[in-house]
Image (cartoon, rainbow, N blue to C red):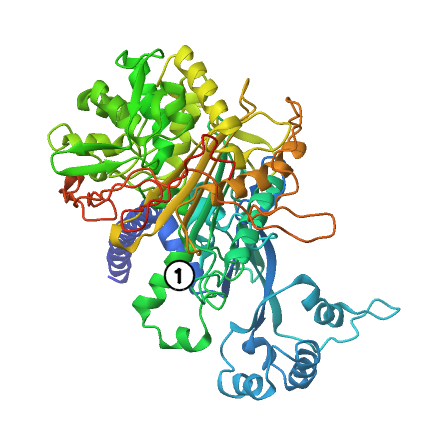
Amino acid sequence: MGKQQRKRKKKENIKFQRYMKSKLVVFFGLLLACLCALIGRIMYINYTNGEEYKKEVLSRQDYDSQLIPYQRGDILDTNGTVLATSVAVYNVILDCKVLTSSQEYIEPTVSALLQCFPEQIEEEKLRSYINEESKRAYIVLAKQLSYDEIQDFVALQEAVDDDGNLKNPDIKGVWFETEYKRTYPYNSLAADVIGFTSAGDVGTVGLENYYDDILNGVNGRIYGYLNSNSDYEKTVIAAEDGDSIVISIDENVQAIVEEKIAEFNEAYKDNVREGEDGAENIAVIIQNPNTGEIIAMASYPTFDLSNPRDLTPYYTEEEIDAMSDEEMYAALNAIWKNYCVTETYEPGSVQKPFTVASGIESGTVTTDMTFYCDGSETFGSDVIHCFERSGHGTETVKGALMDSCNDALMQMSYLIGAETFLKYQSIFGFGQKTNIDLPGEAYTASLMYTLDNITPVDLATNSFGQNYNCTMIQMISAFSSLINGGTYYQPHLLKKVIDADGNTVSTYDPVALKQTVSESTSDLLKEYLYETVSAGTATSAKVDGYSMGGKTGTAQKYPRSEKNYLVSFIGFTPVENPELVIYCVVDTPNVDDQAHSTYAQNIVREIMEEVYPYMNIYPDEETTGINANKDITGATVSEDGSTSEGQLDDENSDGSITESEIVEDNPGGNTSENTNESNNSDEEDNSNEEDNSNEDDNPDEE
């Protein structure tokens, strides 16, 4: 009996063990399956979202990052002279979390900061940060200090004794953040060409704006964190510095140009209009006619690139304080503008070589033609005068340019015809952007006539440069093609791009856009314009011993009734193989008798006297004593320092209406200064005065 019971219990134990083993197998099987599934899921998450979770984990750890600023590229002149650069400056940063982590750190650190930065840091404000913002890790105490200005504090931080131990181990929680500050070594030189940057290295005007993407780089960053083993790990992404640009501006020529503009302004400042500059605007461009490169470009008023928002040179403190935001913005834009590119005006008689070239190139005017100037042309009841009211008499084509005869030019325009005249205006680029590499270039298409709206009087006045508008860069680029054999080059400043290591990234090759005239026509115009400077209306521009060709211009501004004038001279040198073209505009000179291009000629002569030797352009003519010892006003300076009064002996007037006014619609319906109010004068309008025309054959002899 007992034996049977033992056998039965043994069988039951065996069954139980088998049952438990089965359950355990199932349990462990399920557990293993879950574990495999979990491992698989983790692997899937790591593969698909690993980086995201890594960032989340890092964000919960002790972690910091620090910006590594890029260095903006430089702007260099054609000789490598730095015109704009970025220099390292330092912000003083206070980490209150570190400083307040021990009371032993506070006083030594405060004392060191006040000792080294007495002008930048106030003790009261510093202690308020420590007491009230102890958890902040980033407080800017001082901004944009130079390397030298921070060295005293760095010396205290790093000072060691003879055993190599820190002398000031309790100076804690202060570090220096590096950034870059844009600087301009020559202050106002080429200000409206170079431009400046605003906060964040944003180019505001000039080349700084146009080539902003090239000059700017990409910031880097240092990432640091404590890993799972509490070890500090650091990742550095280096900054990419911006590229530098080399431009065609020659700093020395630019300085000469700006010096002479300033000299002219000073000579005529407060002259007639009290409290006003020597002219409303004065501007000069020098261009290489064989490449389109701009060698110098300057205008007045100008500004200091290091302090571009300073209006004190032009306004009193009271006037500035009284300005509204809109008035302030307008005043700043007035000095920031690049007159040579953004402003339009009626050019006057510098247009005449283009009219002659259009006639010769189209075959409608020939060199053997003559034109009779009786002093005016009549359009119905309206009369447009030549400056020589009594008439020049018979004029050849060359003589018409030399004497700046409006009457002869108007007669040529009849032969050329409106369609051909407008065709050549387009060929020369008037009414079109030159696409020079500067921002804000004016678009003048709406300031030009079309075949649909041009009238006979419009054609006549356009022939001598009134009643249409252009820009200085349009005029000089077109003129360069007239005297270089007929090739129109796109005007430009960029020569090449170089990286931070000085390696050339890209170069700019001259771009020949079109042929405006034939080489024979170009040679003919050079001859005519040479005679204009040698014996015509432009002798005041000549530097003795150097050949030059050129043309004067004096345009009466709108409204005509105010009798204000824009005077100019455009010239090229040497005549045989031109290397330079120079164009000078003086807008509303501060004088009683404005209508004389002599003001512009004097500036050009004074500039070229210094540019010739600098650029190794040698005399190519015998000296005659012409313009000897003249100053910026045209006055002759004697050996004892005394001066004789300058002469205004160029042409006085390029046409004016006396019998009545012709009021026409503007080209394109524009209501700018190009209004076709037809007191069409390119030089002085004497319609309401006694006839005082210059009757000398040689206008440079009184």
Q: Determine which quarter of the picture holds residue 433.
A: top left
- Report how many numbered discs are placed on residues in the image: 1
> Residue 133 at x, y = what percent?
49, 83
Crowdedness near tag 1: few (<14), some (14–19) or many (≥20) residues, C-alpha within 10 Å: some
Q: Determine which quarter of the picture holds residue 664.
A: top left
Q: Is residue 606 above or below residue 139?
A: above
Of 119 and 345, the residue lying toward us: 345
> Residue 124 at x, y = what percent?
57, 89
Of 233 and 227, the residue lying toward us: 233
- Residue 5 appears left or right of 397: left
> Residue 459 at x, y = what percent?
20, 30
The residue carrying mark 1 is: 332
**Residue type for callout 1:** Leu
> Residue 476 at x, y = what percent?
42, 32
- Residue 675 appears left or right of 538: left
Of 504 and 632, the residue lying toward us: 632
Q: Is residue 267 above or below residue 257?
A: below
Quadrant into which the N terminus falls: bottom left
Can residue 297 be seen in this snapshot? Answer: yes
Of 436 and 201, the residue lying toward us: 436
User: What residue lies at 67% left-to-right and 33% top-to-bottom?
Assistant: 613
Q: Dot 1 lies on which element?
A: helix
- Residue 447 appears left or right of 348: left
